[in-house]
């Protein structure tokens, strides 16, 4: 099933945890609608800006899959409202700054970001979307131990701006 021009439902429901444990990872019709909103309101905009495919690390999670991961039952992943993603060759912090400046979102988390590692693509971006008008615009950075408000300062290359 196609959710938007560049995204298919199977990208959001693929789960090694579900496969290994014989769990179903099937969204309801409402969850699918939320995934479509996430695609149109955030992911398609990101793809158009960076002109590269987006790699979905984690999308929809059934409650059973989510619990196997040790995540909260209230996770937006269980409602089809959240996605964890990366873009090959584009630093996650750069994408996160762009999303913050250009998209309506509920929560944006730069996860497992570690500038000292020298790996600009360490970690991933978590972003969630609720219906229009119901988004908190919460921005966090998680280093693997604790959450901090906002995104870390980014060292910009000469002439580079977030539009």
Image (cartoon, grey):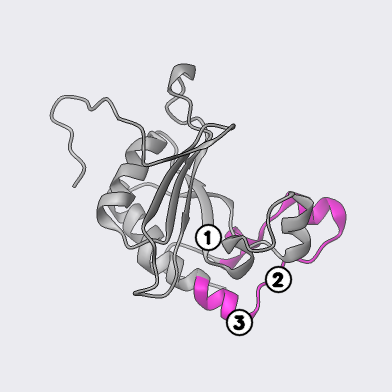
Instruction: Judge by depth and name the residue closer to the eye, 127 or 4.
Output: 127
In the picture of the structure, the residue carrying the numbered disc 2 is 26
Numbered tag placed on residue 82 in the rendering: 1
Residue plotted at (58% across, 58% down): 59
The range drawn in magenta is: 9-34
Residue plotted at (58% across, 32% down): 144
Secondary element under disc 2, as helix, strand or loop, is loop
In 3D space, how far apart are the residues under numbered discs 2 and 3 (Cα atoms)? 10 Å
Residue 55 lies, with reference to residue 8, above or below; the image says above
Residue neighbourhood size for the residue with mark 2, other residues' Cα within 10 Å, grouped as few (<14), some (14–19), many (≥20): some
Numbered tag placed on residue 29 in the rendering: 3
Left or right, 49 with reference to 90: left
Quarter occupied by residue 24: bottom right
- Residue 7: x %, y % from top left: 48, 63
- Residue 66: x %, y % from top left: 72, 57
Residue 20 magenta-drawn?
Answer: yes
């Amino acid at each position: 099933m196609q959710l938007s021009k560049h995204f298919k439902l199977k990208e959001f429901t693929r789960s090694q945890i579900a496969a290994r444990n014989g769990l179903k990872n099937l969204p309801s019709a409402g969850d699918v609608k939320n995934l479509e909103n996430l695609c149109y309101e955030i992911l398609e905009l990101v793809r158009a800006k960076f002109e590269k495919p987006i790699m979905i690390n984690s999308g929809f999670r059934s409650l059973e899959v989510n619990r196997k991961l040790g995540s909260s039952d209230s996770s937006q992943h269980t409602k089809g409202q959240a996605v964890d993603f990366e873009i090959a060759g584009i630093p996650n912090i750069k994408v996160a700054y762009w999303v913050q400046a250009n998209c309506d979102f509920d929560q944006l988390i730069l996860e497992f970001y570690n500038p000292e590692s020298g790996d600009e693509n360490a970690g991933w971006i978590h972003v969630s979307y609720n219906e229009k008008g119901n988004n908190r615009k919460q921005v966090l950075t998680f280093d693997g131990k604790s959450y901090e408000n906002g995104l870390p300062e980014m060292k910009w290359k000469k002439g580079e701006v977030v539009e």
